[in-house]
Amino acid sequence: PLHLSMASSCFTSISVFGVVLGILLTVGTWVSYIPQQVKMGTRRSSRGVSPEFLFITNIFSTAEFLNVVLLNMDTLHCCKHVSFWECNEMLLPVYQIFVMPLNTVVIYVLL
């Protein structure tokens, strides 16, 4: 059947090390923003943070995220044919890139 051939051509297994490294990089990127967010939240001030820099960084991060999504469009379509875990394994690079614009938006909210 077409469904089985599509599933086998979609999923290429990543090593356990690769998955763990991908998860650590994603969590590490997210955690690296926390001190700045906490500092701004407790001070209720963005003193020392340039809004222009944040704006440019957010544009760059969002463009990079859109680029990764477009480049991984086939992978997104494959998610219909593989398990939830296999899909998330294939989408780790997308998650890693998404963390940056998401955290920048949180900083904007704290401004």
Image (cartoon, helix red, strand yellow):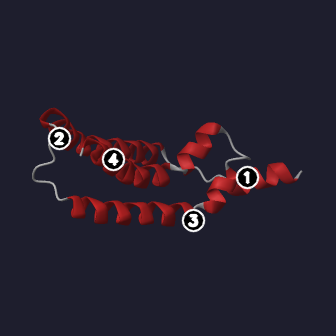
Q: Where is residue 81 shown, x and y percent of the image? A: 74, 47
Mark 2 to mark 3 CA distance (whole Å): 34 Å
The one of 28 and 47 positioned closer to us in this rendering: 47
* Three-letter amino acid code of the residue under disc 4: Asn
**Mark 2: which secondary structure?**
helix
> On residue 8, which mark appears?
1
Whether pointer 4 and pointer 3 mark residues with C-beta atoms closer than 8 Å, the reply is no
Whole-Å distance between the Cαs marked 1 and 2? 48 Å
Q: Residue at x 32, y 44 (%)?
A: 106
Whole-percent x and y of residue 26?
Answer: 37, 46
> Are there few (<14), some (14-19), or many (20+) residues within 10 Å of tag 3?
few
> Which of the two labelled residues, at mark 4 and mark 3, occupies the earlier sequence position?
3
**Amino acid type shown at disc 1:** Ser
Sequence-wise, the earlier of marks 2 and 3 is 2
Q: Could you tell me the amino acid type at mark 2?
A: Met
Residue for point 42% across, 61% down: 62
Snapshot quadrant of residue 73? bottom right
